[in-house]
Image (cartoon, helix red, strand yellow):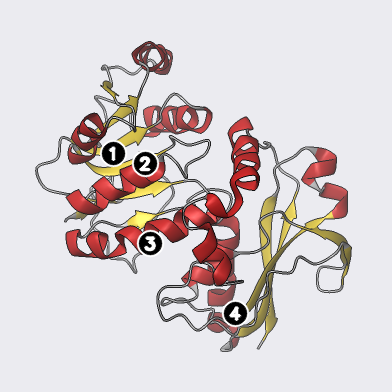
Amino acid sequence: GLRRTEQGVVTTSLGRIQPHHLIILERMGRTYDVVILGATGFTGQLASEYMARVYPIGKSNVRWALAARSKPKLQSLADRLGTEKPVDLLICDVTDLEALERVVASTSVVVNYAGTPFIDKALPVVELCAKLGTHYCDITGEIPLHRASYDQFHKAAKASGAIVLHGVGFDSVPSDIGAFLAAKAMRERHGCGSVRITGYLTDSSGGVSGGTIATVLDLIKKGVKVPGAKEASALGAYPLDPLGGVGGPDTRDFALPGYDSLGKMWTAPFVMAAGAEVSRCQTVSVPHSRSTNCTTATPLALCPIIRGAAPACLPTCLID
């Protein structure tokens, strides 16, 4: 497919991407560039508002549509967005495979917010994307889903050219991208690798959505019955390793609250500190290798359990 941005600038994977540049790997003959699936949910609405603000219908060359199972809710969302030209609304329940296939086949990219939890809703979407060569991303940090998705659909996605990205949200972006940039800066500035990268999550606005809480409770209730759970558990601290992965120094053990000498502060472990997404990305071409131990901590004074705030991640490195 072709790479292009909203500004029409063609870039390579090594090129600099400015904020708000939307790069689309186009699939020829598709009606839309992006379809937001589950648009009427909490995070789906946030994504829809972003698209309407940054890529307004009628003023942008990015073709996008909203998809959800409820027509009244979709129409209410579209009315609230107030786009200059009407945004296309696609009625789709992820349990209706015929309707779902029509949506997946109509777009270059599916951005999936239909979850709570994702584990019983996302796999059919991933399967169709892998089959039809449609790129896919979601925001869930459900590690069993990531494992099941890879095990079941990696070969099909590779054959069709579909790119499947899970966890493209708070569960992985601060830790994964933060670790990548910190290790990259270490090599560029000091010419060496790092043995430890720690992310400190500081105060910021926001909070935990009801969907996230419901998902956690559902995973606890179902345990190993969840698709991919048993396979992920068997791989220890590296549940997202590809076939043949060799692991590394990380463990699944959560540290106890205590004084962090690197950050010079009292910290508690972050709920997503297992860092599975970072560990997965360490298996591909990134500046931090498997010899790098990656952790995330929350300063006790800013702990979201105490303050009710969603933290932001500030990564630091120790020199190799």
- Quarter occupied by residue 173: bottom right
Q: Name the residue under label 1.
A: 34
Tag nearer the camera, 1 or 2: 2
Q: Nearer the viewer, residue 217 or 249?
A: 217
Q: Which residue is drawn at 53% across and 58% down?
A: 229
Residue at mark 1 to residue at mark 2: CA–CA distance:
7 Å
Instruction: Please tell me whether mark 3 sits on a helix, a strand or a loop.
Output: helix
Q: Mark 4 points at which residue?
A: 186
Instruction: Please tell me whether mark 1 sits on a helix, a strand or a loop.
Output: strand
Q: Name the residue under label 2.
A: 111
Amino acid bearing label 2: Val
Q: Residue at x 55, y 67 (%)?
A: 278
Q: Is residue 306 above or below residue 40?
A: below
Q: Is residue 18 above or below residue 204?
A: below
Q: In screen coordinates, is 31 left or right of 118?
A: left
Mark 2 or mark 4, earlier in chain = 2
Expressed as whole percent of the image width and height from the top left, the position of residue 98 reads 20, 32
Amino acid bearing label 3: Tyr
- Quarter occupied by residue 268: bottom right
Mark 1: few, some, or many residues within 10 Å (few <14, many ≥20)? Answer: many
Residue at mark 4 to residue at mark 1: CA–CA distance:
36 Å
Mark 2: few, some, or many residues within 10 Å (few <14, many ≥20)? Answer: many
Expressed as whole percent of the image width and height from the top left, the position of residue 109 reads 28, 44
Q: Say if mark 2 contacts mark 3, CB within 8 Å.
A: no
Residue at mark 2 to residue at mark 3: CA–CA distance:
18 Å
Amino acid bearing label 4: Met
Residue at mark 4 to residue at mark 3: CA–CA distance:
31 Å
